[in-house]
């Protein structure tokens, strides 16, 4: 059967779930895994319509089906979850990425689909938009007014097919926290990657091949004191840093985050073949929670980016 999805709100970022198909919402307890997609969309930046009408390969259908059937573990909650969302993400120049989405995890299952440019009368696409804006140019400019940072980003960086290839490139590495204080215990993590994928702490090792990390949320304890840290990696630095560190064919390594004895200093680097590649531009803030719940705990215990709010940290491909 077919499931219709109409979503007029955009700009959420790679893999984000505006317009998600909820695969568990059917009254009979769920729906079949998707086997095709037929979608028309408008790229506001390009002022172009695209259409993707494709039946998935048997290999992709099986991959998606297996993802929905296989449960994954949530370490903090001590329970298993299943994927419940299917995200169709339209990128510039007709690219379409497909994700499965659930509590604590999102995985990219296909990044090779490309729609074709089509002609669509604005009146047929958005009747209200046509009534108020009349022309496609005016309609797109009006919609972009809601995403001023995206328009400024486009003017600075343009649109490059190579960007998506860079984002989806995978490397053989693992992520490791090293604590100077031997009493520190790593309790939780959430790793976000440039592809829009993320993993909450599981009871299994992470995949060995991973895209560049974009953000890390981590928790650790020292005695009865809890630390919750967020690490926002610099886009230009990780693009260049990973390329340099893993330039040798078959290279494998680690992303290492060293935490000082007093939990207020961090050294971050890629470690490949015994060589360190520092990542010094990472924006970090840490909250500390003590049993006394002191007033000052409302503010970060450590913060190296007081001049920029976390929500204002953007990446070119968002």
Image (tube, rainbow, N blue to C red):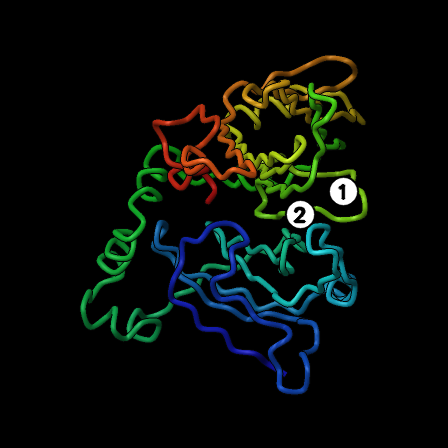
Query: Is residue 60 visible to the viewer in this orientation of the structure?
Result: no
Read off the residue under disc 1: 206
Whether residues under marks 1 and 2 lie with C-beta atoms below 8 angstroms apart, the answer is yes
Q: Nearer the viewer, residue 267 or 87?
A: 267
- Give residue 314's position: percent from left, percent from top: 42, 38
Give the quarter of the image for residue 306: top left
Read off the residue under disc 2: 199
Q: Nearer the viewer, residue 32 or 74?
A: 74
Q: CA distance from mark 1 to mark 2?
A: 8 Å
Considering every residue shown, the one lying at the far top of the view is: 275
Query: Is residue 315 visible to the viewer in this orientation of the structure?
Result: yes
- For disc 2, the neighbor class at 10 Å (few under 14, some 14 to 19, many from 20) is some
Q: Is residue 92 above or below residue 36?
A: above
- Give residue 242's position: percent from left, percent from top: 64, 25
Q: Is residue 142 above or below residue 31?
A: above
- Give residue 139's position: percent from left, percent from top: 25, 60
Q: Is residue 27 left or right of residue 149?
A: right
Mark 1 residue element:
loop
Mark 2 residue element:
strand
Q: Is residue 104 left or right of residue 236?
A: right
């Amino acid at each position: 059967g077919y499931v219709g999805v109409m979503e007029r709100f955009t700009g959420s970022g790679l893999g984000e779930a505006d317009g998600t198909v909820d695969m568990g919402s059917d009254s009979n307890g769920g729906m079949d895994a998707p086997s095709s997609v037929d979608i028309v969309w408008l790229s506001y930046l390009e002022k172009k319509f695209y259409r993707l009408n494709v039946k998935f390969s048997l290999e992709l259908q099986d991959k998606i089906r297996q993802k929905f059937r296989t449960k994954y573990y949530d370490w903090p909650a001590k329970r298993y979850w299943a994927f419940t969302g299917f995200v169709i993400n339209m990128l510039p120049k007709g690219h379409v990425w497909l994700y499965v989405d659930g509590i604590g995890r999102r995985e990219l299952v296909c990044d090779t689909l490309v729609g074709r440019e089509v002609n669509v009368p604005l009146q047929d696409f958005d009747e209200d938009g046509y009534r108020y804006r009349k022309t496609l140019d005016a309609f797109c400019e009006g919609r972009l007014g809601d995403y001023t940072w995206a328009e400024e980003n486009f003017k600075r960086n343009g649109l490059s097919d190579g960007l998506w290839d860079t984002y989806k490139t995978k490397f053989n590495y693992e992520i490791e926290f090293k604590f100077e204080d031997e009493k520190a215990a790593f309790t939780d993590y959430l790793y976000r990657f440039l592809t829009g994928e993320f993993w909450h702490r599981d009871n299994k090792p992470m995949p060995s091949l991973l895209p560049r990390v974009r953000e890390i949320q981590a928790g650790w304890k020292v005695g009865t004191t809890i630390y919750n840290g967020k690490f926002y990696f610099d886009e230009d630095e990780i693009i260049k840093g990973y390329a340099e560190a893993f330039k040798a064919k078959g290279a494998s390594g680690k992303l290492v985050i060293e935490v000082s004895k007093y939990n207020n200093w961090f050294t971050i680097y890629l470690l490949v073949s015994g060589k360190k590649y520092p990542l010094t531009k990472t924006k970090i803030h840490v909250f500390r929670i003590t049993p006394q719940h002191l007033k000052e705990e409302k503010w970060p215990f450590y913060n190296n980016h007081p001049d920029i709010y976390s929500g204002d940290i953007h990446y070119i491909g968002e």
